Image (cartoon, rainbow, N blue to C red):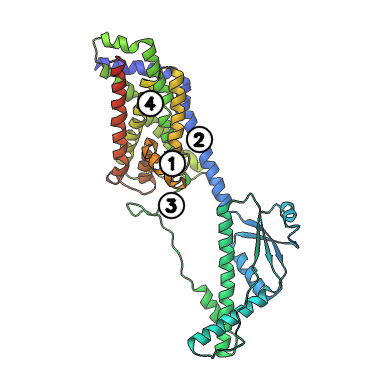
Amino acid sequence: MYKFTASITKELRLLSRDRVGLMIMFAMPILLVLLITSIQISAFELVNNSKVKVLLCNKDKGKGSQEFLSYLNEVGRFDLVNIDMTDRNVGDQMNDHDAFVALYIPEGFSEQIAKKASYSADKALVEFGINEVSDTLRMVNVDSLTIYFHPVLQQSLRRSIQGALKSVVQLVESKSMLNALYFSINNKPMPASFEKELFNNQIGIREKTTSHNGSRTIPNAAQHNVPAWTIFAMFFMVISLGGNVVKEKLSGSFVRLKILPTNFIIGLLSKQLLYLLVAMSQVLVIFSMGVFLFPHIGLPALNIPHDWLALIVVSLICGMSAISYALCIGVFAKTQEQANGFGAISVVILATIGGILVPSFAMPKSFQFFMNLSPLHWCLEAYYGLFLEGGKLSDLTSSVLPLIASIIVLQTIALIGLKRKNLI
C-alpha cells in the first residue's frame, strides 16, 4: 500500500507542475461550454423567436389579398413593410430596409382566387351529381405570388418561409371555395358564425419528447453541450498524460522502475487512477456550472438525471476511455511534441466525426462507419441516453459495451507497445 501511495504522490506532483495541461483540461472546456451554449441559444432565438421583416408590394386591393395579409399577420412570424417596388429595384429596396425577404402580390389576385373557387365549387357539384356539366366551366389559372430572397438567407429558413406562405394561401383558397360551394347550394352567403366554426375547429398538435421512462422534459442546449464538451475535455488530457509518459520514457524512469523492488503495474495503475480522479473532477466542475451558474447568466439549467449510479458509471467509463487513449498515444510517441501535436489533432478529428463539434444527424451517410470508430461518439451517446432520454444503466448497453471494448483494446495496445520497447 505504501508503494502505491508513494506512486500516486509522485504522479500528483508531476500533474501539479503541468499548469498548461491543467488549464487545457479545466479552463478550456469551461469557456467552450459557456461560449457554444450562449451562441446556440442566441441563434435559436434569432431563427425561431424573432420576426422576419418582409417587404410587401400589394398591387391587388380585393378581398382575397386582404384576407391573405390578415392571416399572414396572425401567424406572428412576419413583420410586413408596405412598399412600391419592381423587379429592377427590389434588390435596392431590400438593402435600404435591411430586409432579406420581399413579397409581390399581382393585380387581380383576389378576382382570380374568386373565379378559381367558383370553378372548384361548380366542378364539385357536377361530380356529386347535383349540377349538370356546363360548357362554360373553365379552369382558371391564378397568377403566382412572387417571393424575393436575399442570397445570404439559408435554405432551411427559405423553406420555412415558403411553407408558411403556402399554408396561408391554401387557407384563403379553401375559405373561398367553401363560400362559393355554400352559395351555389343555398343561393345565399355563408353565415359568419358557421364560417368561424369551420375554420376555428382545427385539430391540435401536441409535442412530446421520446424517452425511456416517459419523461416529458424537452431537451435544451445545456443538456447537449455540457456532456459533449466534458467528454472533449476528458480526451484532451492526452496533452498532460501523454506528455508525462513520453517524458518518463526519455528520462529513463521506466528503466529505473524495473530495478526497483516494486511492480511496474503499481506505477501504471497509480497514473491511471490519478487521471481518473481528474476526469471525475472535470465532470463535477462542468456539470455544477451547468446546474448552478447557467440560470444566473440567462442560459437554460442542466437537468441532472435521476439515476445517479448510471451517471457515475458512465462518467467513469468515459474517463477510462480517455485515459486509455492518452496512454496509448504517450507510449508510441517519440517526443513530447509528437504526443501533444498528434494527440490534440486526433482528438479534434475524433470529436468532429463523433458528433461533438458537428451533430451526427448532419453528417453524410458515408461518415457513419467512421463515426462508430470514435470513442467520443459512444461517450456522447451514453450521456445522451441519460440526459435526453432519461434512460437507466440497463438501457445504455449499446453505448457502454463499445466503450468497454475500446478501453480493453487501447490498454492492450499500450502494454504491447511498452513490452516491445523493453520498458516493462
Q: Earlier in the sequence, mark 3 or mark 1?
A: 3
Q: Which picture quadrant has residue 38?
A: top right
Q: Which residue is mark 4?
A: 326
- In the image, taking residue 167 as reference, residue 239 lies left or right, namely left
> Looking at the image, which residue sits at the far front?
135
Q: In 3D space, how far apart are the residues under numbered discs 3 and 2 (Cα atoms)?
A: 23 Å
Per the image, label 3 sits on a secondary structure element best described as loop
Residue shown at the point (35%, 24%) measured from the top left: 327
For the residues labelled 3 and 1, say whether their Cβ atoms are less than 8 Å apart.
no
Residue 280 position, x and y percent, is: 37, 31
Residue type at numbered disc 3: Ile
| Nearer to the camera, 368 or 356 | 368
Q: Earlier in the sequence, mark 1 or mark 2?
A: 2
| Nearer to the camera, 400 or 277 | 400
Q: Earlier in the sequence, mark 4 or mark 2?
A: 2
Residue type at numbered disc 4: Ala
Quadrant containing the C terminus is: top left
Residue type at numbered disc 2: Leu
Q: Earlier in the sequence, mark 3 or mark 2?
A: 2
Residue 355 position, x and y percent, is: 43, 41
Q: In 3D space, how far apart are the residues under numbered discs 3 and 1 (Cα atoms)?
A: 20 Å
Mark toward the viewer: 3 or 1: 1
Q: In 3D space, how far apart are the residues under numbered discs 1 and 2 (Cα atoms)?
A: 15 Å
Q: Earlier in the sequence, mark 4 or mark 1?
A: 4
Residue type at numbered disc 1: Gly
Mark toward the viewer: 1 or 2: 1
Q: Which residue is mark 3?
A: 218
Q: Which residue is mark 2?
A: 32
Within 10 Å of disc 4 (Cα), the crowding (few <14, some 14-19, many 20+) is: many
